[in-house]
Image (cartoon, rainbow, N blue to C red):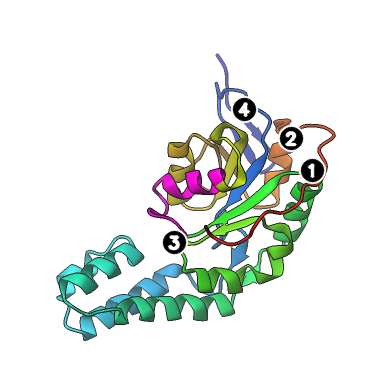
Amino acid sequence: MVKSRIYIGIFIPALCDSPAVIRAVLFDMDETLVENPYPYSVIRERVQDFLISRGVPRRDVLAMRRTYEDTLRLSAEHDLGDEPLKFLEDEEVRRAEMSRPHPEALPLLGWLRERGLKIAVITRNTRRAAEIALAPLMDFIDLVLAREDVRNAKPHPDHVLTALEALSVSPSEAVVVGDYPYDIEAGKRAGCITVGINTEAHYTVEGLGRVRDLLELLNLIEEGSSASPAISRRGQ
């Protein structure tokens, strides 16, 4: 019987196929590369209060599941125009201004870049917020795709597949890293290896710093790789 293996801070599931050598790593932003002073749920609550103040029935507001998509839908249904979406974006920007890079982000991104891997960030945040939060890390990031940059944001695989197309990398050559089920679902549906930070995925690690340990443990990076030039960091 093949048993799952548990290393320090890393869970390797049983009977997991040996992955191929990878060429790109796609990261979630919030609570993966970037730490925030309060959870996104606070923004959702503020948006819900805003919608209720504009006359949207409380029962409809409390049924919200995806903040961005439901804000768009309820705004259209109740003829509220762009005001609720502007409120949401301003809240995200305010939150991003208080964010900071995860302590392990720069060392990990630098290590990946030295080995020639392409690096992307896929986030459900607005681009304005992403550019603020990621500013200290942008020298190591090849591509950022916010929700405005794709037809369907995470957990839809379009978010991942659009990034891979821009990077010229196939799904089998990419790893998606995130802390939330939406990240993992998008990566799996796109056909990528997934690494969950304290969340269920193909591989699970206890923190961002363990991603390097995992990649080395699985021998996922080709020996002799060297740094490659960055491509456009903007959305397409």
Judge from the rendering whether residue 101 lies leftward or rightward of residue 95; answer left or right.
Answer: right
Judge from the rendering whether residue 91 lies leftward or rightward of residue 55; answer left or right.
Answer: right
Q: Residues within 10 Å of mark 3 (few under 14, many from 20)?
A: some
Q: Residues within 10 Å of mark 1 (few under 14, many from 20)?
A: some
Residue 104 at least partly seen: no
In front of the other: 191 or 59: 191
Q: Which circle's residue, 4 or 2, is located before the other in the chain?
A: 4
Residue 133 in the image: state x and y as whole percent.
Answer: 60, 71
**Of tags 4 and 3, which is closer to the observer?**
3
Magenta stretch: give its range: 148-165
Which label sits on residue 147?
3
Q: Mark 1 = which residue?
A: 115
Instruction: Measure how far apart labels 4 and 1 are at the Cα level.
Output: 18 Å
What is the three-letter code of the residue carrying label 3?
Answer: Arg
Q: Mark 4 = which residue?
A: 19
Residue 17 in the image: state x and y as whole percent.
Answer: 57, 22
Judge from the rendering whether residue 46 lies leftward or rightward of residue 210; answer left or right.
Answer: left
Residue at 39%, 47% in the rendered image: 156
Instruction: Measure how far apart labels 2 and 1 are at the Cα level.
Output: 8 Å
Q: Which circle's residue, 4 or 3, is located before the other in the chain?
A: 4
Q: Which circle's residue, 4 or 1, is located before the other in the chain?
A: 4
Residue at 60%, 39% in the rendered image: 169
Residue 23, quarter of the rendered image: top right
Which label sits on residue 221?
2
In front of the other: 148 or 236: 236
2 and 1 marks in contact (CB < 8 Å): yes
In the picture as drawn, the residue positioned furthest to the top comes out as 1
What is the three-letter code of the residue carrying label 4?
Answer: Pro
In front of the other: 83 or 229: 229
Q: Which circle's residue, 2 or 1, is located before the other in the chain?
A: 1
Instruction: Measure how far apart labels 3 and 1 are at the Cα level.
Output: 29 Å
In front of the other: 226 or 180: 226
